[in-house]
Image: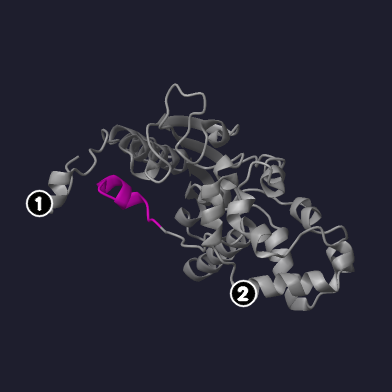
Amino acid sequence: MDDTWIRRHYEFWFMQYPTGRGLLDNAADLRRSLYRLFRKLDPDRDSRSLRHMVMVGHSMGGLMARLLTQDSGNAFWNLAWSAPIDRLDLTAEEKSILEGSLFFKAVPFIDRVIFLGTPHAGTPAAQTTLGWIAGKFINIPSPKLLFAKSVQNKNREFTRFDTNQESTKSVNQLRPDSPLIQTMNKLPRPPKTHYHNIIGNLYEGSDEPGDGYVPVASARFPWAESEIVVPAGHTDIQGHPLAIKEINRILREHYAAISGELGSATEAIEASPEIIRPETESDRLNHREPLP
């Protein structure tokens, strides 16, 4: 936001979500929120800017961003149930909730996704003592758990999932052997979405490089059109100067791609800044803004 060109051409929206809830539920909430916002902000569907969104997702947020750019088909339904939805004993509301989470199409106005420290192949940390401890501090909202149990109890002959607290926590869905992660990685590649990857690595030269939570091998994404590795930890990667510079570059590249105007594209590329210096302890003590 210190970059005047970025401020002039982009508006930033942020999503906060309950970390403990499952990926599919959080992605469904984000999908619904985006469509609701678009209907409110662009009822006539004539805003060109709103039709070319860039998503930036850190960690689990990157997996959510992926889910918004892919068609589910029957993949997630078949993961949870052994019969078609019409064979289940469901109220109209229950059916609507299940359909919203397990059947979805790619959001058409998301053009590009930038991943930051995203565990595309899961993370072994979810299997460790640290992951177990983290899971103990996470509680699934009671209404959600009660809904799942109610639906399962009426349809036990068709269910393929468990509704206990542990199985529905997002930390367990990030295990490398998670059926959800494995199913996500089998979905077809979207033909029009551009992906970029920023990976953290604190352990250069190690047999197991990574950002302290996500191994480099898990953070790699085969569809990425660009990839950089920065010397940063999992919780610091989004503030690293090289990551900031790379996101800046991608946003300018995106604008150039959709502008169709040579002058605007040239302006975007030529105005790209040098690396931004991180804030220092001296800056904080003297309440000064960090210099470029």
What residue sits right under mark 1 in the picture?
Answer: 286
Q: CA distance from mark 1 to mark 2?
A: 46 Å
Identify whether 22 is placed above or below 281: below
Horizontal relation, residue 251 to residue 74: left or right:
left
Residue at x 16% of width, y 50% of height = 284
Q: Is residue 34 at all visible to an observer of this figure?
A: yes
Q: Is residue 288 at all visible to an observer of this figure?
A: no
Is 10 within the magenta? yes
Percent across and percent down for residue 206 are: 47, 24
SS type, badge 1: loop
Residues 269 and 132: in front is 132
Closer to the camera: disc 1 or disc 2? 2
Tell me which amino acid carries mark 2. Answer: Ser
Tell me which amino acid carries mark 1. Answer: Asn
Horizontal relation, residue 190 to residue 243: left or right:
right
SS type, badge 2: helix
What residue sits right under mark 2 in the picture?
Answer: 142
Residues 223 and 143: in front is 143
The magenta span reads 1-12
How many marks the image carries: the answer is: 2
Percent across and percent down for residue 106 are: 64, 52
Residue at x 33% of width, y 37% of height = 245
Residue 275 image-quadrant placement: top left
